[in-house]
Image: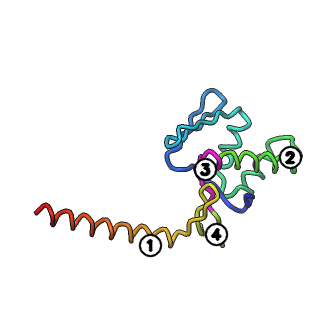
Amino acid sequence: MVSFSERLTVAPDVLFRLVGDEGVLLNLNTTLYLGLNPVGTRMWHALTSASSIQAAYDTLLAEYEVEPAQLRADLEEFIQRLLGQKLIVLVEMLDGFERHHRIHGCIVEREAARVALEELEIRLAVSLGGVRDRLS
């Protein structure tokens, strides 16, 4: 379940194009695409530009004549579909700061990811040094 205190961002390697009043999302890694009708396109714009899912919900609730519970259910379903096609990344906010990213249900702590990346860079540098030594 998605927390409305989170915000979402467009996943890396995802393109959005407006075609008339409809949208098309394409994940360049998976080659999956999702066509959006005008309401879906408006939801996409609200979700990707708001400071949180709750802020997007509040904006959409003010724009559309819809029952609050129905809009909440529709947003949750839409977000799950976007996550399923790896079109978005959820960002948890704690005390106004981004704590970690959740990509398709997996949580990656920023510090742990940074350390893992540094370790990988070190191993790569050591491996490349060994290759250079053998070539010399």
Where residue 134 sits: x, y (%)?
A: 15, 64
Instruction: Judge left or right: residue 34 versus residue 62.
Output: left
Q: Residues within 10 Å of mark 1 (few under 14, many from 20)?
A: few
Name the residue at 65% across, 47% down: 84
Q: Quadrant of residue 40?
A: top right
| Alpha carbon separation for disc pair 2 and 4 | 28 Å
Q: Quadrant of the C terminus?
A: bottom left
Which of the two discs, 2 and 1, sits closer to the camera?
A: 1
In front: 38, or 81?
81
| Of the image marks 1 and 4, the number of the one nearer the N terminus | 4
Which of the two discs, 4 and 3, sits closer to the camera?
A: 3
Q: What secondary structure is found at the residue carrying circle 3?
A: strand
Task: Specify the label residue 14 is tagged with.
Answer: none
| Alpha carbon separation for disc pair 2 and 1 | 42 Å
At label 3, the amino acid type is Ile
Residue that mark 3 sits on: 88
Q: What secondary structure is found at the residue carrying circle 2?
A: helix
Q: What secondary structure is found at the residue carrying circle 4?
A: loop
| Alpha carbon separation for disc pair 2 and 3 | 22 Å
At label 1, the amino acid type is Val
Residue that mark 1 sits on: 115
| Of the image marks 1 and 3, the number of the one nearer the N terminus | 3
